[in-house]
Image (cartoon, rainbow, N blue to C red):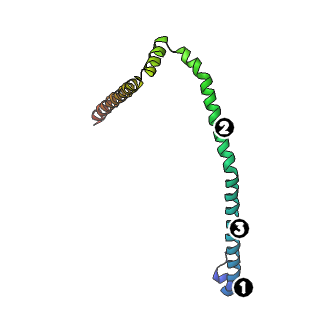
Amino acid sequence: MRDTETMRSNGQSAAQFAPWVAGLTAAGGGTAVLLARRARRRRKQTAPARIQAARDAARDAARGAARNLPAAARKLPDRWTTTVSEAMENKRWRTMAITAAATTWLLFRWSEIRQLRQMNRELTARA
């Protein structure tokens, strides 16, 4: 960009240079607005296609999981499948779910305590 000394040496004043700067700024701003509008229009047009593609992908994933489920169920012991089936029929599944959640929480809690104790031992050994 030109500085004032260069403009003076060329015989130009700031008044002669200002319209050029204003025109450049207006052109840049106008171009930015047009590009933003075009991008917004393009996003609106492609949004339904992306939504439909996501729905199709989710449907295909669910179908794939449903196809693989019987094979995974065959790998489980018969005792487990019969116990779960009976619990679902008798509405005991809530008790089983709560018990499983509580057991999982307890195991995580124990592992956290174990890790904290080990960390404390290492910190006291360094000090």
What separation in Å lies between label 3 and label 2 (alpha carbons)?
37 Å
Secondary structure category for the residue under label 1: loop
What's the amino acid at mark 3?
Answer: Thr
- Residue tagged 3: 31
Q: Earlier in the sequence, mark 2 or mark 1?
A: 1
Viewer-side residue, 54 vs 114: 54
Q: Nearer the viewer, mark 3 or mark 2?
A: 2
Q: Quadrant of residue 71?
A: top right
Q: Residues within 10 Å of mark 3 (few under 14, many from 20)?
A: few
- Residue tagged 1: 10
Viewer-side residue, 61 vs 18: 61
Q: Residues within 10 Å of mark 1 (few under 14, many from 20)?
A: few
- Is residue 23 found left or right of 118 in the rendered image? right
Q: Quadrant of residue 91?
A: top left
Q: Position of residue 121 (x, y in %)?
A: 29, 31
Q: Residues within 10 Å of mark 2 (few under 14, many from 20)?
A: few
Most distant residue in the top direction:
78
